[in-house]
Image (cartoon, coloured by chain):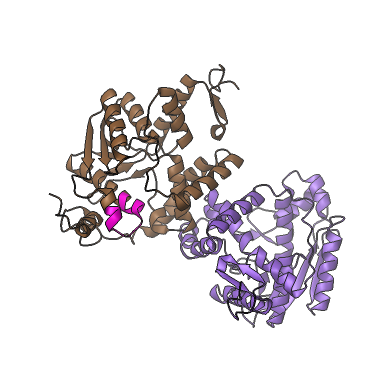
Chain colours: A purple, B brown
Amino acid sequence: MKCSRCKEPAQIALPSHHAGFCEPCFLEFFRRQLERGIRKQKLFDHSDSILLAISGGKDSLALARELKAMEYDLTGLHVDLGIPGSSEKARAVVEAFCQAHDIPLVVVALEEEGIPIPEVKRRIHRPICSVCGKVKRYYFNKLAQDRGFTVLATGHNLDDEVARLFANTLRWDAAYLSDQGPLLPAEGGFARKVKPLWRISEYETAAYCFFTGIEYHMAACPYSEGASFTRHKKLLADLEEASPGQKLSFYQSFLESGRPAFAASEAEHGPELTPCAQCGYPTSAELCGVCRVRDALGQEPAA
Amino acid sequence: MKCSRCKEPAQIALPSHHAGFCEPCFLEFFRRQLERGIRKQKLFDHSDSILLAISGGKDSLALARELKAMEYDLTGLHVDLGIPGSSEKARAVVEAFCQAHDIPLVVVALEEEGIPIPEVKRRIHRPICSVCGKVKRYYFNKLAQDRGFTVLATGHNLDDEVARLFANTLRWDAAYLSDQGPLLPAEGGFARKVKPLWRISEYETAAYCFFTGIEYHMAACPYSEGASFTRHKKLLADLEEASPGQKLSFYQSFLESGRPAFAASEAEHGPELTPCAQCGYPTSAELCGVCRVRDALGQEPAA
């Protein structure tokens, strides 16, 4: 197989794009896909100050490296979940990476915030992934707001987005379908949220890390059981294999024709948000979800 | 396993309904699912005169037997496609069935109409399944209108509907998503169209035929290659196996939350229909699709 751009021997095949690339042309291709994703959905520009959530996995590190190389105003945010045997490794990877790439880094340690995830798991009898996700989003938003960033970015890739879209579509969950996408505008106390990797697959970010020598934190979270989400990803992989390009076209046509239909019908039904009585975070209840977790753990309110 | 209703030994397991049944209770269950599908979507009542398209496969025969037993005003319509080695068998099955069950039957032979499917396949260079479907729907509608039936019914089952919904959703095809469902009201020269088996799976109609001794036409159409439609059915079967009941809940939640969103956004965009200049059938072009097929075959217009 020859590289689709320069005709030298290809080092990676990308059936979804009906293409194959040598290493330099793949990196060029990756950059262009990222630029296209940013431009097409008007995610941000060089006047924005971007806070990027960096978990230490391949997606967030690949995105951090590229955004830095593209000279965006970039700061990293790592939430240390406090899971023994896992979180300290992820944090060390992120700290070393940011230092090596000259990216300013903010670390929030949930241990210091009084809500380490192992304690939450022990005390709160709801699926831990959903509670942990809520806590992380809380700090992503809070840091972005408190420190005046104009954009909050995450490393969600095409596979993440498609699996989530698929799950929401199986339920025809109009509330989620009305605002899922790579861009959520700033609104009512929330920073603008963007997912610049929305056009790029998991396989492509893994290849990017391989070619650029990024050493990322590989271990899956010890608490994730991966039930239906993983099953859907497998099913969507089968679909992609049978029809290369299907995932991206499913997601793109959703953004073009699906989301607008739900956005129109949901416009008037969204819940009213007010500041949390304890911490001021926007919420549809009296206390926000994280303050309720804190209360359940018997912790003092956040300063 | 015991029957979920009467506690006698079960003869069929239905994981989708978290149930198992003995033969009599399965037939009772089948009837109730059908009644529920008719009532919930207000498909028709005993004042309607129903024209049911009967191909000779398990779905249309099972539906014919049930609707007759429920004392609806029922007439069968069989379109003989004129495919050697296949159509004559299907037609014989339908004729024998309708005679045995005292159901009046109208047969349209495409050979006599001047557009037998083998000739269409030879001369028209488009996917034959889509052209054949168009021709069948044309005669379904035409007969229902010409003979004053108030309802046109087809034997599409839950698997058919879910596979079609899935394909339309992968493309987010707003025009199809705005009106897919078990009921399409009479409109602009089209009879009211209904799919009474929408809650019932292919497996359930096959079991129904087995238990009631219906001998149906089993052979797949020799022209169908079954590409993506079959692949999607396989994938949806995997999904159902992992989460029993998923297909019906996907389809039902679409009817509740998906379709209304698309119907609202598509209301003003539907194409204007006018009568075909040759045969009077409603069409968005000057000639309807079937008259264009006729013209391509060098046939005279229909009387």
Position of the N terminus of chain A, as image quadrant, is: bottom right
| Coordinates of residue B184 in the picture (x, y in percent) | 33, 46
Q: Residue at x 32, y 38 (%)?
A: B55
Instruction: Give above or below for B239 relative to A243.
Output: above
Can residue B243 be seen here? The reply is no
Q: Looking at the magenta stretch, what is its main secondary structure?
A: helix
The residue segment tinted magenta is B120-132
Position of the C terminus of chain A, as image quadrant, is: bottom right
Residue A112: quarter of image: bottom right
| Coordinates of residue A29 in the picture (x, y in percent) | 62, 76
| Coordinates of residue A243 in the picture (x, y in percent) | 52, 59
Residue A32: quarter of image: bottom right
Residue at the outermost left position: B303
Residue at the outermost front position: B85
Q: Residue at x 28, y 27 (%)?
A: B96
Residue B125 among magenta residues: yes
Residue A270 among magenta residues: no
| Coordinates of residue A36 in the picture (x, y in percent) | 57, 76
Can residue A99 be seen here? The reply is yes
Q: Nearer the viewer, residue A143 or A27?
A: A27
